[in-house]
């Protein structure tokens, strides 16, 4: 739509305004990955989901580049991860998964008796 706006555009003012509103209404799915370790771990807890059975944290995204950038930031802090996908959802949309072991992040298992109040 932006390419259409820059190359063709509308002459009619109402149609021009509606095109601007339509472009502004699109969601931005690109993530801004924090660089500090504490902020990065908070970001992981916000975006990810813990699978207690496998003792891992999974982060899903429809954009592979989001997970590649997150994986790069984790690698800078010495946290290993695995990028999986592409997979298809039940609605046939494509998504990717970044998998991390919880013990590599926090130094203990999710099933350990220590309280997780600090997480």
Image (spheres, rainbow, N blue to C red):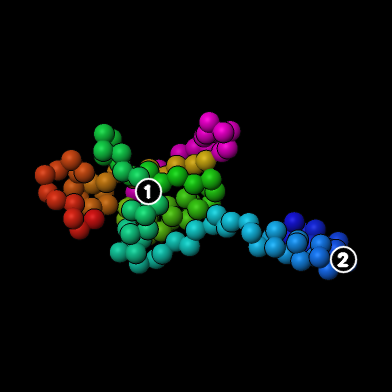
Which residue is labeled 2 in the image? 12
Number of marks in picture: 2
Locate the N terminus and report the quarter of the image it occupies: bottom right
Which residue is labeled 1 in the image? 48
Residue 94: percent from left, percent from top: 56, 38
Q: Secondary structure at mark 2?
A: loop
The answer to whether residue 83 of the structure is visible from this angle is no
Q: Residue furthest left?
A: 113
Please tell me which residue is depicted at 81% across the width and 62% down the height of the picture: 15
Q: Earlier in the sequence, mark 1 or mark 2?
A: 2
34 relative to 48, above or below: below
115 relative to 38, above or below: above
Extent of the magenta region? 80-94
52 relative to 105, above or below: above
Q: Residue 73 got which mark?
A: none
On the rendered structure, is 74 left or right of 54? right
Q: Decide which of 73, 41 is in the foreground and name it.
A: 41
Within-10-Å neighbours for mark 1: few <14, some 14–19, many 20+: some
Please tell me which residue is depicted at 48% across the width and 56% down the height of the picture: 69
Residue 108: percent from left, percent from top: 18, 47
Q: Decide which of 38, 49 is in the foreground and name it.
A: 49
Please tell me which residue is depicted at 28% across the width and 35% down the height of the picture: 54
On the rendered structure, is 21 left or right of 67? right
Q: Quadrant of residue 38?
A: bottom left
Please tell me which residue is depicted at 76% across the width and 66% down the height of the picture: 17
């Amino acid at each position: 739509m932006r390419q259409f706006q820059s190359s063709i555009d509308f002459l009619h003012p109402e149609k021009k305004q509606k095109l601007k509103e339509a472009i502004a209404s699109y969601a931005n799915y690109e993530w801004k990955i924090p660089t500090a370790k504490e902020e990065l771990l908070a970001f992981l807890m916000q975006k990810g989901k813990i699978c207690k059975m496998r003792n891992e944290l999974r982060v899903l995204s429809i954009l592979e580049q989001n997970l590649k950038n997150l994986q790069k930031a984790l690698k800078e802090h010495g946290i290993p991860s695995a990028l999986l996908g592409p997979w298809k959802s039940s609605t046939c949309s494509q998504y990717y998964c970044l998998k991390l072991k919880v013990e590599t992040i926090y130094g203990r298992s999710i099933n350990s008796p220590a309280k997780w109040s600090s997480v």
